[in-house]
Image (cartoon, rainbow, N blue to C red):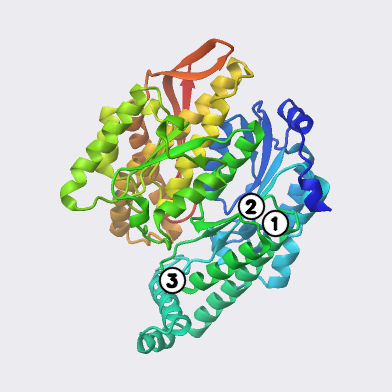
Amino acid sequence: MVKRLRRLFSISIAVLLLFSSVGMIQAAEEKKELATLLLVPLDDRPANTYFPQQVGHSAGVNVVVPPKGMIGYFTEPGNGDEISKWVLDNADKADGFVISTSMLAYGGLVASRTGVKSLEDSLRDIQVIKKLKELYPNKPVYVYDTIQRLAVTAISDEYVKYYSLISEWAILYDKVVNLGMEGKERLDELESIIPAAVLDDYKKARARNHTINQLMIDWVDQGYIDNLILAQDDAAPYGLHRAEREQLLAKVNELQVQDQVSVFPGADEVGVVFISRFVNHFFHTSPKFFVEYGGIHGKEWIAPFEDTTFDYNVQKHIHSAGGTIVDNEEQADIHLLLNTPSASDSTRAEDIDWLVNRTKELIAHGKQVAIGDVLLVNKADEEFVMKLAHSVDLTKILSYSGWNTAGNALGITVGHAAARLAFLNQTAGFGVPLYEQTAKAHYEFLLHRFAKDQGYKNVVHPAARAYIQQIGASEWSLGDKYDLVNNFVKEKLTKETENWYQYFDGKQVYIGSRGTKDFYKKISSLESVHVKLPWPRIFEAELEPKLELN
């Protein structure tokens, strides 16, 4: 019954959604948007809250997350029962839902890597997903979860040691036990070194999570979930996740739900990917991507912490974001340029030049360009991004990301580009206030990306690490040194953001069209820069610049 109801989308419903007035869900001041989406995030970090919210705003969609007290903090898990009640209380005001099973079932990404919460309790807290579809069969329900990564979470210096050991154990176990390869002596040695309690908890979490992932595929088949992403958290070609992934894919094929379920390397970017999918569903669009590699082709590269060739990851992210890939660049809505490794060190400068010149060429011909800076883990490719900034008008780039893993950077780039273009291509004529509001969000996020991925990761983060060593703290658990380090990061990252703003200052930017009239605004000032360490560690930082357009 639910499966049939899900298919009864009609033009009349779509029209009603498009022109529905959005009620206030939060007590905070709301902007007028075209639609409202409820997001249950993977955790409370910026990648899972600010990123998707800002991408949503750039397309006229209000992305609302539960109150901070519900979704946990660092090692403190979120409350699945309270979040379920919040979702149901606000569901009537929403036009769609994006839900992290990791948050509902376990309390977030970090909590999902421990076996503390039982399978029974986890199953209880995800029932709200079924309830949503029963109550609102015409509203899209997108769900995502992770396939547990190789390592435990580095929450202390002690766990940093286990991080490497458990990763090695998981890889060797797959090779030796599952595939009959060599390495049993080292496997036995690792099992004698790693505390039994730590290893048992790791195994318990994996087994529970795998059961939930299988159930989510069943719920797709039963019509409770419209689209599901099972994102492979940090991994490698071998490991316990490999067998789990094969079992999950076999189930997808058996139930013939391949068009609704994607399995690919990633995690923190999936919120942005699903925002894009909702935006394209809402506007009845599907952007066409033409993909080009600045270095080696994706079929020749497996990125660090990933377990498939990168071209597969590209295909899956674009499809999940609501887009398609075309072989003819003349048919493309978006040109996706990917900064992959060079064939050799001797060709690196040449590859960078090609990427920069290709970007200039496409922009000169009025094309939409999205750049995935996927070469390096956790940071931008400094040589490339600085040359780009000095050679190209950054406000003409549709999206950019170099944050964290290749899959993370890819998904942020694709999702932001697809969502923003879907809005820009609308011909209804929404009015200058909405055009300005969405443009402001778009350029704030674009500035954020360059300042965060280059300014923070390549400049401020190394400086903060040196400062932490100087004051005798741990970068993974700042403790009573949090305020000192937070103030250090705030000062340095604010300055870096101001430096990156020079590439946006005074630029005349297109914000939208109504009929035959195009509208433009000038980026006139950087009003403020909010910086804060969201967790007592320096791996990530909140960065929220506010721009003035006139």
Between 397 and 323, the one lying in front of the other is 323
**Residue 159: assigned label:** 3
Q: Quadrant of residue 292?
A: top left
Q: Earlier in the sequence, mark 3 or mark 1?
A: 3
Q: Residue furthest top?
A: 517
Circles 3, 2 touching at the beta carbon (< 8 Å): no
Residue at disc 1, secondary structure = helix
Where does residue 122 sit, x and y in percent of width and height?
69, 66
Name the residue that disc number 1 marks. 220
Between 411 and 458, the one lying in front of the other is 411
**Which amino acid type corresponds to the residue marked 2 in the rendered image?**
Gln
Q: Is residue 38 visible?
A: yes
Between 261 and 83, the one lying in front of the other is 261
Residue shown at 36% from the left, 48% from the top: 374
Tell me the crowding category of disc 2: few under 14, some 14 to 19, or many 20 or more residues within 10 angstroms, Cα based.
some
Q: Residue furthest front?
A: 328
- What is the spatial separation of the Cα atoms under label 1 and label 2, in whole angstroms? 7 Å
**Which amino acid type corresponds to the residue marked 1 in the rendered image?**
Val
Q: Is residue 50 visible?
A: no
